[in-house]
């Protein structure tokens, strides 16, 4: 392995001094978890930064998703329309709630739900739609909301990739019945582990809050089968520190992405994600789709060539969630042919705020050297 390995991502961290300063008062209060002062402060800072009405923070993005679905009280065994081109969490959140995922195909431009196929999948058993803003690319929100309204369906967005994004000048978390974010270490913004749900309906918020704390209403009344998904004070403190630097981090990512585009735009057989209109981007990922015939090398060959040089790109998202071994025989991957096509050709390149231009150029040179 070469000495200077380049990983696909690198977690953002404040200086150790800044973090120590932030956690000092935890030693005065001895308040470590259960919605303490850091939790409250982090939450209100987030609401402001994300430009959303209401927000609740969680131990991770997965529990944010899973408990959002539970809080909507969808009928057991009802169907939730989603996409298979996502992280395991999205599909697992549906299945773990006793709901049935119905897979809608994606489009091969920005890899989000192909909304032209959505309506045909709706039956009298459908209760909700769970679209994913993949790589920070925003789904076709207007069409999803129009169809949801027409059929009386709930909408929960998996917004794990869209921290800080805005669409039509509104925080991306203000769309749908709920939008779920992840603050995992590998994401654009982290609180070590963490997540959040943005929503508007107050009753939904109360239910959600109860579910993240075992379903406890008060000391003597427990009237929901909840989980434990509370964010602790040390994670909240990390989030508070990282939030102070997030604009700077995103600005640095924008420069990295610009350099990738400069190197890779117009290369035969390499498709880049489009720049979406009316979207304030967070530059979360840089996926390239490689067409072997036009480019002369396959995705797997490029992946291997980079690995040889100590550079880890990721086959993200491969495999599709509807092909996972834990669902063996339950779903037919041939019903989502575009997702299958994309998952075999997609590669996400290393991207983090401090990735140097020299490294970006080196990565692109290795990719271009695969061209035949
Ligand atoms: C990261 C991620 C999640 C889960 O978030 P965690 O904070 O890791 O639990 C869910 N969906 C998508 C698309 C993700 O990338």
Image (cartoon, rainbow, N blue to C red):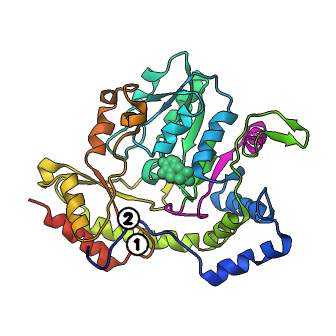
Q: Relative to 196, does residue 328 appear above or below in the rendering?
A: above
Residue 193 part of the magenta segment: yes
Which residue shows up at 74% across the image and 34% down it? Answer: 225
Residue, disc 1: 255
Secondary structure beneath dot 2 equals loop
Q: Relative to 224, does residue 233 appear above or below in the rendering?
A: below
Mark 2 or mark 1, whichever is nearer to me = 2
Viewer-proximal residue, 147 or 364? Answer: 364
Is 358 on the left-hand or right-hand side of 18? left
Question: Visible in this render: residue 167?
Answer: no
Q: Quadrant of the C terminus?
A: bottom left
The disc placed on residue 333 is none
Q: Quadrant of the N terminus?
A: bottom left
Q: Relative to 46, does residue 137 appear above or below in the rendering?
A: above
Which residue shows up at 37% across the image and 25% down it? Answer: 329
**Highlighted range, magenta:** 185-211
x, y (%) of residue 27? Answer: 80, 75
Q: Say whether marks 2 and 1 touch (CB < 8 Å).
A: no
x, y (%) of residue 97? Answer: 60, 32
Cβ of mark 1 under 8 A from ligand 1: no
Residue, disc 2: 8
Is 276 on the left-hand or right-hand side of 149? left
x, y (%) of residue 268? Answer: 16, 56
Q: Quadrant of residue 183?
A: bottom right
Crowding near the residue tagged with mark 2, few <14, some 14–19, many ≥20 C-alpha atoms within 10 Å: some
Is 268 on the left-hand or right-hand side of 189? left
Q: Relative to 46, does residue 3 appear above or below in the rendering?
A: below
Question: Visible in this render: residue 311?
Answer: yes
């Amino acid at each position: 392995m070469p000495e200077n390995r380049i990983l696909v991502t690198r977690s953002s961290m404040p200086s150790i001094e800044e973090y120590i300063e932030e956690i000092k008062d935890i030693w005065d209060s001895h308040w470590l978890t259960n919605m303490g002062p850091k939790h409250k402060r982090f939450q209100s800072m987030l609401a402001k930064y994300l430009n959303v009405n209401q927000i609740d923070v969680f131990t991770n993005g997965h529990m944010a998703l899973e408990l959002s679905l539970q809080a909507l009280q969808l009928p057991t065994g009802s169907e939730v329309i989603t996409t298979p081109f996502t992280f395991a969490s999205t599909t697992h959140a549906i299945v773990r709630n006793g709901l049935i995922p119905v897979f809608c195909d994606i489009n091969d431009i920005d890899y989000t739900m192909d909304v032209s196929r959505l309506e045909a999948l709706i039956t009298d058993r459908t209760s909700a739609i769970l679209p994913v803003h993949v790589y920070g690319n925003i789904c076709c929100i207007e069409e999803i909301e129009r169809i949801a309204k027409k059929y009386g369906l709930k909408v929960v967005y998996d917004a794990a990739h869209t921290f800080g994004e805005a669409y039509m000048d509104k925080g991306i978390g203000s769309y749908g019945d709920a939008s779920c974010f992840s603050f995992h270490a590998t994401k654009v913004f982290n609180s070590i582990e963490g997540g959040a749900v943005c929503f508007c309906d107050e009753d939904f918020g109360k239910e959600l809050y109860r579910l993240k704390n075992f379903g406890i209403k008060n000391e003597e009344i427990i009237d929901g089968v909840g989980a434990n998904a509370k964010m602790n004070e040390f994670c909240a403190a990390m989030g508070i520190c990282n939030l102070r630097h997030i604009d700077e981090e995103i600005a640095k990512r924008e420069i990295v992405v610009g350099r990738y585009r400069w190197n890779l735009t117009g290369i035969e057989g390499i498709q880049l994600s489009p720049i979406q209109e009316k979207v304030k981007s967070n530059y979360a990922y840089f996926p390239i789709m490689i067409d072997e015939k036009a480019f002369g090398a396959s995705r797997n060959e490029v992946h291997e060539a980079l690995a040889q040089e100590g550079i880890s790109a990721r086959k993200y998202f491969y495999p599709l969630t509807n092909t996972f071994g834990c669902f063996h025989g339950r779903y037919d991957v041939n019903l989502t042919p575009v997702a299958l096509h994309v998952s075999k050709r997609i590669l996400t390149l290393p991207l983090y705020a401090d990735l140097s231009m020299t490294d970006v150029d080196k990565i692109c040179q290795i990719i271009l050297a695969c061209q035949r």
